[in-house]
């Protein structure tokens, strides 16, 4: 699908014109539609109308203007693109001015392109007969405001780069686990880095053992596929401390000896969505040429049951010397993240953020509408919330009160890897906090409910990996570049 921009009033009519309408604001006489009120998500198709800009029109309800957000522009563009494809339309014209609301033309243009692009993703490389190519070949942004040309073109270029990063992230996470092993994930990161002017270092089993990363070694010891530790850096000269992003990379999670139920276990290939998000975000940061030093750390391995697998009751020693009593081998993500967070100390980070499909309790709390956020720094938490709202990848903060640590005090070690009973999401955050204590600005994002979509196609995401985290991280890093 080609993205184009038109600033001409005398343009040839497109096959379909998408027009946004706020609730209570009736469309023009040429775009009148019965029983159309402009409520959010409402649509009305008007065939064979007399307009200079379109042969047919699709009215899209935007809801109340005072509740309008950038994400509603994204979703409107996605709905328009999906409708155009269902009607076998080749050219869709998006009347940008009608969708902008109080946002600038540049902001609206970027959101519209993200929406159209993200809705167009598909993963069918393993089908013997892939889905036929989309009929929609062109998505055109249309606005008569020539004064906004520079801002619109810049936003469209950035949106294209961000969307490519989300596509790449979704591709990594959607690969089957027999293909996307730790070794393959590391090689994918290396190839991406080579093509996008990033430096990449891969630590193998011997180096991981030499560093005494007991969390990664313990989780991976039951698998025939050895672990990897991925280090990505953008090539920016800056005197400021770096932003360090850490992503959980369990390429398949059986639960280990504390094995999961067989139902839905196939979805555990998505337990590396945090890793995929960090790798994808690094691709975007490099291509946007953001003037901020950013480092991505990805511990990756499998969690498998076997004669050599880690046992409930084992005690391990992580990179920073803290000992962990493993009471449940299915609480493995925090063990590999512990080593990665401790490893980040050598970079003296300005801020440290990890992202992980960590707890089912988080999904049970927020469903797929928000990711859980915990942080030791108010400013960092505020920046993440702001980035989440702007990108549409919303978060909700949970407390890290000292009293919660009592729930993970171990009998025979410094700390245990599960709560004694309650507060599973928060105590997982408390566990990770013990390994990020070298920095005052740390945050944890639990994406267990938002990393994949299993309830059917949505405007911005088909079934499968959502690519959550890439757009939020991009906004976060951009905020530090100003």
Image (cartoon, rainbow, N blue to C red):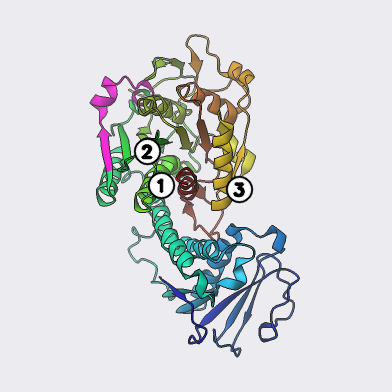
Element on which disc 3 rests: loop
The x and y percentages for residue 475 are: 49, 48
Query: Which badge, 1 or 3, comes first in the chain's sequence?
Result: 1
User: Residue under circle 2?
Assistant: 296
Q: Secondary structure at mark 1?
A: helix
Q: Which residues are magenta?
A: 199-217
Crowding at dot 3, Cα within 10 Å, few <14 / some 14-19 / many 20+, comes out as some
Q: Quadrant of residue 5?
A: bottom left
Which of these two is toward me, 178 or 472? 472
Residue at 39%, 68% in the rendered image: 131
- Judged left or right of residue 344, residue 51 is right
Q: Is residue 410 above or below residue 203?
A: above
Q: Would residue 140 be visible to someone looking at this image? A: yes
Question: Label 3, on which residue?
Answer: 369
Q: Which residue is mark 1?
A: 281
Q: Residue at x 62, y 42 (%)?
A: 366
Label 1 – label 3 distance at C-alpha: 21 Å
């Amino acid at each position: 699908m080609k993205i184009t921009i038109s600033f001409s009033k005398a343009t040839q009519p497109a096959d379909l014109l998408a027009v946004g309408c706020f609730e209570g604001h009736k469309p023009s006489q040429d775009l009148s539609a019965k029983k159309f009120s402009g409520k959010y998500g409402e649509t009305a198709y008007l065939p064979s109308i007399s307009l200079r800009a379109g042969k047919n029109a699709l009215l899209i309800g935007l809801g109340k203007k005072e509740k309008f957000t950038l994400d509603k522009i994204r979703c409107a563009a996605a709905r328009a693109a999906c409708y155009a494809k269902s009607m076998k339309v080749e050219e869709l014209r998006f009347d940008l001015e009608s969708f902008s609301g109080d946002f600038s033309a540049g902001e609206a243009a970027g959101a519209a392109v993200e929406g159209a692009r993200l809705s167009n993703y598909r993963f069918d490389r393993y089908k013997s007969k892939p889905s036929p190519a989309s009929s929609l070949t062109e998505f055109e942004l249309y606005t008569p405001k020539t004064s906004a040309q520079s801002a619109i073109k810049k936003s469209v270029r950035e949106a294209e780069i961000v969307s490519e990063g989300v596509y790449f992230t979704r591709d990594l996470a959607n690969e089957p686990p027999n293909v996307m092993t730790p070794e393959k994930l590391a090689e994918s990161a290396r190839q991406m880095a080579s093509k996008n002017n990033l430096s990449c270092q891969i630590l193998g089993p011997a180096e991981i053992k030499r560093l005494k990363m007991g969390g990664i070694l313990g989780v991976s010891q039951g698998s025939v596929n050895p672990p990897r530790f991925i280090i990505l850096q953008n090539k920016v000269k800056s005197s400021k401390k770096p932003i360090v992003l850490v992503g959980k990379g369990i390429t398949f999670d059986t639960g280990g000896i504390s094995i999961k139920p067989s139902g839905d276990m196939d979805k555990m290939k998505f337990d590396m969505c945090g890793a995929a998000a960090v790798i994808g975000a690094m691709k975007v940061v490099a291509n946007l040429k953001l003037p901020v030093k950013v480092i991505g750390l990805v511990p990756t391995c499998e969690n498998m049951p076997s004669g050599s697998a880690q046992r409930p009751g084992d005690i391990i020693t992580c990179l920073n010397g803290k000992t962990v009593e493993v009471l449940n081998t299915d609480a493995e993500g925090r063990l590999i993240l512990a080593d990665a967070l401790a490893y980040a100390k050598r970079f003296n980070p300005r801020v440290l953020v990890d992202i992980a499909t960590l707890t089912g309790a988080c999904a049970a709390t927020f469903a797929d509408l928000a990711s859980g956020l915990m942080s030791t720094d108010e400013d960092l938490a505020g920046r993440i919330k702001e980035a989440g709202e702007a990108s549409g990848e919303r978060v909700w903060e949970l407390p890290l009160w000292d009293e919660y640590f009592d729930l993970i005090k171990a009998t025979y070690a410094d700390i245990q890897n599960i709560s004694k009973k309650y507060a599973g999401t928060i105590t997982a955050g408390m566990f990770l906090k013990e390994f990020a204590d070298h920095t005052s600005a740390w945050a944890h994002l639990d994406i267990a409910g938002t990393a994949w979509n299993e309830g059917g196609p949505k405007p911005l995401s088909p079934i499968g990996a959502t690519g959550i985290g890439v757009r939020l991280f991009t906004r976060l890093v951009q905020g530090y570049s100003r």
